[in-house]
Image (tube, grey):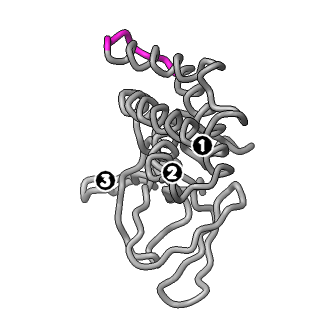
Amino acid sequence: MTSVTNGASTRNVFVDEARVILSDLQHVGNMRVGTSTRAQIDDAVRLMIRNLSRLLTFDWDSRPEVRALIEAANRQLEVPRRPNTESTTHYAFNWLRDSATVGARLANLHKGGPTEPPGTRAESSEAHDVRIGDFYEARPGLFYRVVDMTTPKVGVKTLRFANGRTAVVSGLVDVWRPVERVSSAADTYGPPPYAPAR
């Protein structure tokens, strides 16, 4: 799990790397040998090598199934077994599918802490209710903090993130909202802790 921060030390991106890798591996699982070009397969092979190598750098426990999957991933990454330009398309594709299976099983076993931004709760809301400061899940395991937004037309919002990317949303939107302090009738003195000083 990685969090990327800006200069003001505010969390703007939250990443659970195992979930991001898992979504890449699931994309490979949807590829078909008859409809994928050799260039697409070669690109997927490079991505697979990077993802499997990254998975092997995570901290793992000593469960037998984890050890077996790590050994299988290491075997897949051996240079003589990797597809190259002389390999047939079928060999490259089968290596890719086998590697995706091993990698997905390994990524599913990773316990990397929370799978959502800390201090937030999941909430479904209409696009017009999205707030600055909410986290938007751009893809599984990758959350961007909303820093600005515009409303190009009714029911549609363009969300802007700290990294310069944007997303256009409408209808129901799943966001992760920072948990705000709950006030009660007994708590009537002083401003809440997140209010600006006077």
**Separation of marks 2 and 3 at Cα, in angstroms:** 64 Å
Q: Which residue is mark 1?
A: 89
Query: Can residue 135 be seen in the rendering of this structure?
Result: no
Q: Which residue is mark 2?
A: 33
Marked residue nearer the N-terminal end (1 or 3): 1
Q: Amino acid at mark 3?
A: Asp
Q: Amino acid at mark 2?
A: Val
Q: Please indicate whether residue 63 sits to the left or right of residue 82 in the image.
A: left
Name the residue: 46% across, 14% down. Answer: 71
Q: Position of residue 119 (x, y in %)?
A: 43, 44
Query: Residue 105 versus residue 83: which sits nearer the camera?
Result: 83
Main secondary-structure element of the magenta-colored stretch: loop
Q: How packed is label 2: few (under 14 Cα within 10 Å), some, or many (20 or more)?
A: few
Q: Position of residue 144 (x, y in %)?
A: 57, 54
| Residue 132 disc label | none
Magenta-drawn segment:
58-64
Q: Quadrant of the C terminus?
A: bottom right
Q: Which residue is mark 3?
A: 187
